[in-house]
Image (spheres, grey):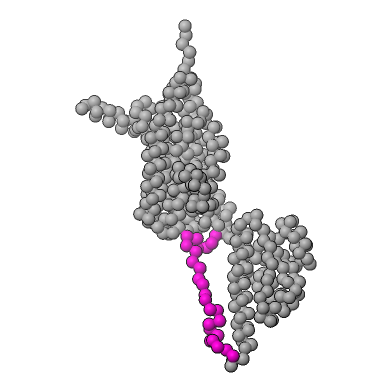
C-alpha cells in the first residue's frame, strides 16, 4: 500500500516539476515565444484589418447601351446609385467592354438591348444580358445582390406605373396589393453580410490551433537537438512517469494560452464589431478541450521533428489543409466522405463549428454537445497516442545517438 502512495506522489511531483520546467523552456525560447505570444496577438488584428471594410463597394461596371433612350439612362442611374456597383462608363460595343474587363478596368458588363424601352412601354418582358467576373465570388455576390434588388424594384415601379395609367373602371384590385408578396431577409450569424464577420469568427480558432501545434513542435525539436548532442538524453527533461511529464508540459502551454484565448475570442470581436452574441462562459469552456487537443496533437506530430526548424514545413503544409478541412470555406456536409472523416481528426474542425454556433448564432454549450464531446474524445486520444510516440522517440534517440563504447 505505501508503494502505491509512493507512485502517486512521484506522479504528481513529476507533473508539478514538468509544469515548472515547461514554463522555463517556453519563456527562455524566443522562437517558441513567437508562436505562443506574438502570433496569437498580431495575426487576428492583421487579418481583421485586411478584411475591413466588410463588403466590397462601387465595383466598376461597363454599360453597352444599344437603346439610348430615357428609360435606359434612368436604368443606368439607378445602377450607379446602388452601394455595390459604380458605372465606370459607356462602351460603344460589347467587344470594347470585354477589352476593359481583360484590363481589369471593370468587373461586370451590362448590355441594354435596342428594344429595351419599346418592350417596357408595351408591358413585355425584356432581357438584360449581364457579364460578371467569377474569379472572386465576393465580387460576383455583390453584383448579383445589387442587380437582383434593382430588378425587383424596377419591376414594382413598372407595375405601379402601368396601374396608374389604367382607367379606374378597369382596376380590379386596390393599388396597395400591386406588390403581391413581400420578403424580408434576416442574416443570422452575419447581419452585416461582411466578409470579416464571416471568416474571422472561425479563423481565430484556427490561429489558436496552429500556433499551439507549431510551438509545441518547436519545443520538441529543441529536445531532439539536445538528445543528439548528449548521447540520446535530454538534460533538461524531467525524469519520472511519462504521462505526468507530457501532461505537465501540456498544462504549461494551456495556462499560457488562457489569457490569449480570452483576448482572441472576446476582445477581438469587440474591438472590430464582429458577431459576438454568445455567452463568454460557454465558449471559453468549449475552447478548453480544443486547446488541449491541439497541444496533444502537436506532441503527436513532434515525432516527425528532428530539429527546431523542421516545424516550418509542417506549418506551410498544414495551414491551408486545415483551413479547407475545417468547414469554414466549404461545408463538411458537402465534402467527399473520406475528407469529411479526415477533417474529424482535426480539433479546429469541431472548434470552428462550436465557436461559430455559440459566438455568432447564440447557441449554448448544451446545443454544441456533439462538438464538445468530440473535442474531449480527441483530447484523450491524442494524449494516449502522445505517450506512445514520446516513449518511442526517447527509445529511438537513446539507441541512435548513444556514444560507441571504448574498447
* Residue depicted at 49% across the width and 41% down the height: 211
Residue positioned most to the front: 337
Residue 299 highlighted magenta (yes or no)? no
Residue positioned most to the left: 1
Quick one: quadrant of the N terminus? top left
Question: What x and y, as percent, mark residue 165?
Answer: 64, 87
* Residue depicted at 55% across the width and 88% down the height: 172
Residue 90, compared with residue 161, is above or below; it is: above
* Residue 110 seen in the figure: yes
Question: What x and y, as percent, mark residue 267?
Answer: 46, 53
Q: Nearer the viewer, residue 11 or 347?
A: 347
Q: Nearer the viewer, residue 166 or 28?
A: 166
Question: What x and y, as percent, mark residue 316?
Answer: 57, 39
* Residue depicted at 44% across the width and 34% down the height: 299
What predominant SS class does the magenta segment belong to? Answer: loop
* Residue depicted at 55% across the width and 32% down the height: 309
In the displayed structure image, the side of residue 207 where residue 255 appears, left or right:
left
Residue 5, compared with residue 372, is above or below; it is: above
Residue 207, compared with residue 89, is above or below; it is: above
Residue positioned most to the top: 407
Quadrant in which residue 116 is drawn? bottom right
In the displayed structure image, the side of residue 155 where residue 219 appears, left or right:
left
Residue range of the region highlighted in magenta in the rendering: 170-194
Residue 182 highlighted magenta (yes or no)? yes
Amino acid at each position: 500500500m505505501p508503494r502505491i502512495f509512493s507512485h502517486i506522489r512521484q506522479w504528481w511531483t513529476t507533473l508539478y516539476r514538468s509544469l515548472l520546467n515547461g514554463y522555463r523552456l517556453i519563456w527562455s525560447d524566443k522562437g517558441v515565444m513567437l508562436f505562443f505570444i506574438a502570433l496569437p496577438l498580431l495575426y487576428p488584428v492583421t487579418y481583421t484589418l485586411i478584411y475591413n471594410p466588410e463588403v466590397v463597394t462601387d465595383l466598376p461596371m461597363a454599360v453597352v447601351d444599344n437603346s439610348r433612350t430615357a428609360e435606359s439612362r434612368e436604368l443606368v442611374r439607378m445602377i450607379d446609385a446602388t452601394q455595390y456597383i459604380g458605372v465606370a462608363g459607356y462602351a460603344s460595343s460589347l467587344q470594347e467592354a470585354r477589352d476593359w474587363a481583360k484590363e481589369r478596368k471593370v468587373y461586370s458588363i451590362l448590355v441594354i438591348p435596342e428594344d429595351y424601352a419599346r418592350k417596357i412601354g408595351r408591358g413585355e418582358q425584356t432581357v438584360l444580358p449581364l457579364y460578371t467576373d467569377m474569379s472572386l465570388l465576393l465580387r460576383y455576390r455583390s453584383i448579383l445582390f445589387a442587380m437582383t434588388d434593382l430588378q425587383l424594384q424596377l419591376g414594382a415601379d413598372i407595375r405601379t406605373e402601368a396601374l396608374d395609367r389604367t382607367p379606374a373602371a378597369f382596376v380590379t384590385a386596390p393599388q396597395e396589393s400591386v406588390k403581391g408578396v413581400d420578403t424580408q431577409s434576416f442574416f443570422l450569424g452575419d447581419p452585416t453580410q461582411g466578409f470579416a464577420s464571416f471568416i474571422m469568427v472561425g479563423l481565430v480558432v484556427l490561429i489558436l490551433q496552429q500556433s499551439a501545434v507549431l510551438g509545441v513542435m518547436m519545443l520538441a525539436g529543441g529536445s531532439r537537438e539536445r538528445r543528439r548532442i548528449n548521447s540520446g538524453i535530454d538534460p533538461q527533461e524531467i525524469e519520472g512517469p511519462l504521462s505526468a511529464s507530457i501532461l505537465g508540459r501540456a498544462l504549461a502551454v494551456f495556462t499560457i494560452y488562457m489569457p490569449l484565448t480570452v483576448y482572441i475570442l472576446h476582445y477581438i470581436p469587440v474591438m472590430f464589431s464582429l458577431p459576438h452574441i454568445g455567452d463568454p462562459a460557454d465558449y471559453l469552456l468549449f475552447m478548453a478541450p480544443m486547446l488541449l487537443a491541439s497541444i496533444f496533437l502537436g506532441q503527436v506530430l513532434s515525432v516527425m521533428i528532428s530539429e527546431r526548424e523542421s516545424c516550418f514545413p509542417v506549418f506551410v503544409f498544414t495551414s491551408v489543409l486545415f483551413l479547407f478541412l475545417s468547414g469554414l470555406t466549404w461545408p463538411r456536409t458537402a465534402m467527399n466522405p473520406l475528407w469529411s472523416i479526415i477533417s474529424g481528426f482535426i480539433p479546429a474542425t469541431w472548434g470552428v463549428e462550436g465557436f461559430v454556433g455559440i459566438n455568432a448564432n447564440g447557441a449554448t454549450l448544451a446545443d454544441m454537445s456533439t462538438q464538445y464531446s468530440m473535442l474531449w474524445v480527441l483530447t484523450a486520444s491524442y494524449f494516449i497516442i502522445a505517450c506512445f510516440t514520446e516513449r518511442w522517440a526517447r527509445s529511438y534517440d537513446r539507441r541512435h545517438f548513444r556514444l560507441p563504447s571504448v574498447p
